[in-house]
Amino acid sequence: MLKTSYQALVLYHVSEFVCRVLMRYRVSLEILKKGLMTNDFWRPVLSFVFVYFWIVKSLFLENYLNVCCEQFYILLDKVEDTCAFIMSSECSDADKRLCKNIRRLYRSTFSKMSACGMFYVDATFPFKIISLISTYNIVLIQFAFLY
């Protein structure tokens, strides 16, 4: 239940971020078109500057979430490595059994945070978001200056 609610929350957050970026970029393109028609260049420039500052700030926050998740994944890998080291060393049977159970639990239940199976929140996620936004921005530019 808790895992499903977090997945839905991450999916909502990312989809809302992408939609908001694309909508703001579209509005900036409309302001640019109006500015080109009326020879007013300052409004489009300021609009694009503010939109890009907002995008950079939002990407920074997304990146911070990904860094925290990646650090958590690295710590879990270190726990598994430590348990493997303890199992190979001279220690009591209870310690070995505990480490064996920890490794078994890690292998059976651990999975990276995902958004309803659509994508994983890991170190490569910011690049995927930037690629998605760039692709749709190019499409928006093509449609904006098509007519």
Image: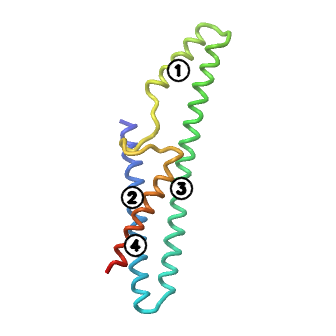
Determine which residue is flagged by label 3: 61
Residue furthest to the right in view is 90
The residue under label 2 is 16
Query: Measured from the top left, where is residue 103 in percent x and y?
Result: 52, 21
Which sits in the foreground, 13 or 80?
80
Identify which amino acid the numbered label 3 is placed on: Leu
Q: Position of residue 132 (x, y in %)?
A: 42, 58
Mark 2 residue element: helix
Question: What is the crowding at mark 4: few (fewer than 14 residues within 10 Å), some, or many (at least 20)?
Answer: few
Instruction: Identify the residue position indicated by label 1 in the image.
Output: 102
Residue annotated with mark 4: 141
Residues marked 3 and 4 touching at CB (< 8 Å)? no
Bin the neighbour count of mark 2 within 10 Å (Cα to Cα): few under 14, some 14-19, many 20 and up.
few
Q: Residue 90 lies in what quarter of the image? A: top right
For the point 41% across and 67% down, which residue is it?
Answer: 138
Q: Position of residue 128 (x, y in %)?
A: 46, 52
Q: CA distance from mark 3 to mark 4?
A: 26 Å
Which label was assigned to residue 143? none
Say whether marks 3 and 2 touch (CB < 8 Å): no
What amino acid is at disc 1?
Answer: Ile
In space, the residues marked 2 and 1 are separated at their CA atoms by 37 Å
Say which of 6 and 75 sits in front: 75
Local crowd size for mark 1, using a 10 Å CA cut-off: few (<14), some (14–19), many (≥20): some
Mark 3 vs mark 4: in front: 4
Which mark's residue is nearer the viewer, 4 or 1? 4
- Mark 3 or mark 1, earlier in chain: 3
